[in-house]
Image: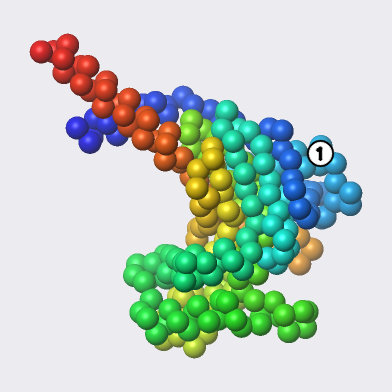
Amino acid sequence: MKTLAASVIMAASVGASAAALTGATITGNYIVWAEGAGGLLSPVAAPTAADIATALGGSAAAPGGNVELSKFGGPVTTLSGIANGHNVALSSLTYADWTSNSNALAIRYIQDAAVSAFGTQLNAANLNTALTNFLNVDVDPSASVRYLWQLVSDPNISYVDVTGNTLSVGLAGLYDATAFLNTLSAGTSAPVLTGLHQVSEVVKVNFDGSDPGYLYGFRATRSGVFAADLVSFTGNYDVQRVPEPAGLALLGAGLLGLLATRRRRA
């Protein structure tokens, strides 16, 4: 029965085409990065709605420009719109996102990085050190105080689309995040960077009014674009989410179809 139900779900997705975000609105501070000659990205002064639409018009194969939500964990910025009939809201993060429920998100992010690198989670001692590094170590004393959690709280969105009930978001980031991972794993006996050189920023997602969730990834493809530092935005992380209500409804439809088939055979 599980195999047939899964087949029904897969069949329902065949032929579905990606629908891009429309009617995009942004509340809060943001930066629009536009692609220029040779793939160089530059910030747009006084961006218009057309500039935002262009920056969000990329794809996994050619992400192009992006829209950066907030900056370094500052006040929340939210990008909203509709894609394929679904309401989508993407937001930046604040310190409270990382530390609520006993640092739940920060721990999950660190442990997911460890699993991606080692296939297993960090032990308690290493996790405690990595968590301290993530939340409390100033990684840029030349600027104002800046922590690792701040560096991954202002997601750069290259595209937003929905295929069937699957939301896909392009996160522009570092193709090689070794320096970030070095700092995260400093002082541990199992460096997080071993076997892992990529990690994305994090975007907070509300999809069709669902409880907010968080998307991030540990596998990037080369984006073909870059900022003036030749490092930023060189990687694209394609992250996805399926809304639970829609998934359950589709599964229910598959099971009903299975029962109907059995009754006809009987």
Image location (x, y in percent) of residue 207? 54, 41
Q: Quadrant of residue 92?
A: bottom right
What amino acid is at disc 1? Answer: Ala
The colour scheme of the drawn protein is: rainbow
Residue 264 higher or lower than 176, as above or below = above
Query: How many discs appear?
Result: 1
Image location (x, y in percent) of residue 240? 50, 46
Query: Looking at this view, is 61 or 56 the one in front?
Result: 56
The residue pinned by badge 1 equals: 49
The residue at the point 48 percent across, 34 percent down is 165
Q: Is residue 231 visible?
A: no
Q: Quadrant of residue 194?
A: bottom left
Residue 50 higher or lower than 182, as above or below = above
Query: Looking at this view, is 23 or 188 the one in front?
Result: 23
Image location (x, y in percent) of residue 115? 39, 67
Residue 140 higher or lower than 80, as above or below = below
Query: Looking at this view, is 193 or 151 the one in front?
Result: 151
Instruction: Give the residue at the far left of this rendering.
Output: 266
Q: Is residue 124 left or right of residue 62?
A: left
Disc 1, SS:
helix
Decide: few, some or many residues near mark 1? Use Cα within 10 Å; few <14, some 14-19, many ≥20.
few
Q: Is residue 240 visible?
A: yes
Image location (x, y in percent) of residue 54? 76, 39
Instruction: Give the residue at the far front of this rendering.
Output: 101
The residue at the point 27 percent across, 23 percent down is 256
Instruction: Give the residue at the far right of this rendering.
Output: 46
Query: Looking at this view, is 168 or 214 the one in front?
Result: 214
Q: Quadrant of the N terminus?
A: top left
Q: Quadrant of the C terminus?
A: top left
